[in-house]
Amino acid sequence: MLHEIDRELEKEGLSQKDYSELLVRLLDYGVICRDESQVEQTLYDRYVRIEELVGEYLSVLGIRIQHDKRFQFIRLYPPGAQVPGMDENQQNAGNPAFRQRLNQSEVALILVLRAQYDKALREGAVDEQGCVMVSLEGLTIAMKNLLKRSLPDNVTERKALFRKLRQMRLVQLQNEDSVHDGDIWLRIRPMIMSYVSDEVLTELMASDDEDDQSEAPDAQGEASDAQGEASEAQNENPDMQSEPAEAQDDLESQDEIAEPETETTTDGEQQADASQSDPLDENKTDEASDNKGDEPDSSVVSNDDDSDTNKPVSLFGE
């Protein structure tokens, strides 16, 4: 078998050392991304040249390979792993070999990264490499909304968390020392879709919707309680309700005391309406007439022509 491998490597101009270096890197990291570094760019290009030879060797171990030619990354799946879009290997089902155990913080962050990637994918906010940009602050808010969790407060634990995801090639971060700054941005790789299936993402979003619906009746109950307290306060203080009514009565009384309206006759003259004369003036006239007694009224004119001119103008213009 080794002689056959050497002949194939010789055709491609590679040595057994080059072949061994590629296999060790794949088995150690489990993933190679061409845009990660210069080293992985060289290893990825080497894999493309001897892809069939590497696949035959790893198939003996029950390891399957996912090669995304569009986004240029390679990922290995351990024996018996369930891979979205790939047939299950029933021969090695239940085999725990080559599996990584993730803690709760890592699992929670991976779920949130998958949800953020799916959201950006629907909005079309994906670059040419299939990556999505997200701020650390937005990632923290999404984690609280979806899982009611937060990132580790300890700086050392937070660095270890993002270092682990960076080794898994799920995120791309320039400097891990700045993970305590909420203004930094990181890239989510498209490989996140193979770590969290659509079924798991659907269940996660459905549970989040149920939490929102359960919180909505509580908010409505608080609003009704606030209205009940306001009505009780008004019942305890009836003066608060009587003040607007008193103010309205004052306005109506002011409207009753109005200046007498005038009407323009056909000759252009304006005279006051006799029906709206001040009642105080009538009282004064009555008092004056009582004081005079039987004295003759000097205002009576015997001349007929003068009496005609002193007649009030008709309101109807007759």
Image (tube, rainbow, N blue to C red):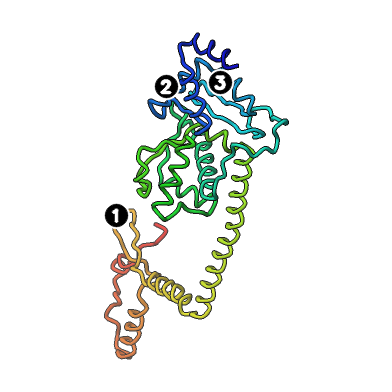
- Count of numbered labels shown in the rendering: 3
Badge 3 or badge 1: first in the primary sequence: 3
The circle drawn on residue 294 is none
Tell me whether the residue at label 2 lies in contact with that at label 3, contact meaning CB atoms closer than 8 angstroms.
Answer: no
Kind of element beneath mark 3: helix
The quarter of the image holding the N terminus is top right
Mark 1: few/some/many CA within 10 Å (<14, 14-19, 20+): few
Q: Secondary structure at mark 1?
A: loop
Name the residue at 59% across, 36% down: 98
Q: Secondary structure at mark 2?
A: helix
Q: Is residue 86 above or below residue 212?
A: above
Find disc 1 in the rendering and name its residue. 268
Where residue 155 appears, x then y in whole percent? 39, 52
In-front residue for pair 4/99? 4
Q: Is residue 74 above or below residue 97?
A: above
Question: Residue at the location (53% across, 54% down)?
Answer: 148
Q: What is the C-alpha distance between the residues marked 3 and 1?
A: 114 Å
Where residue 74 appears, as percent x and y from the top left, is 52, 26
Mark 3 vs mark 1: in front = 3
**In x, y percent, where is residue 139?**
45, 45
Q: Are marks 3 and 1 in contact (CB under 8 Å)?
A: no
The label nearer to you, 1 versus 2, is 2
The residue singled out by tag 2 in the image is 42
Three-letter amino acid code at the position of disc 3: Val
Q: Residue at x 46, y 21 (%)?
A: 17
Which residue matches tag 3? 54
Question: Mark 3: few, some, or many residues within 10 Å (few <14, many ≥20)?
Answer: some
- Is 2 drawn above or below residue 203 in the view shown? above
- Kind of residue indicated by mark 2: Thr
Residue 291 at x, y = what percent? 30, 91
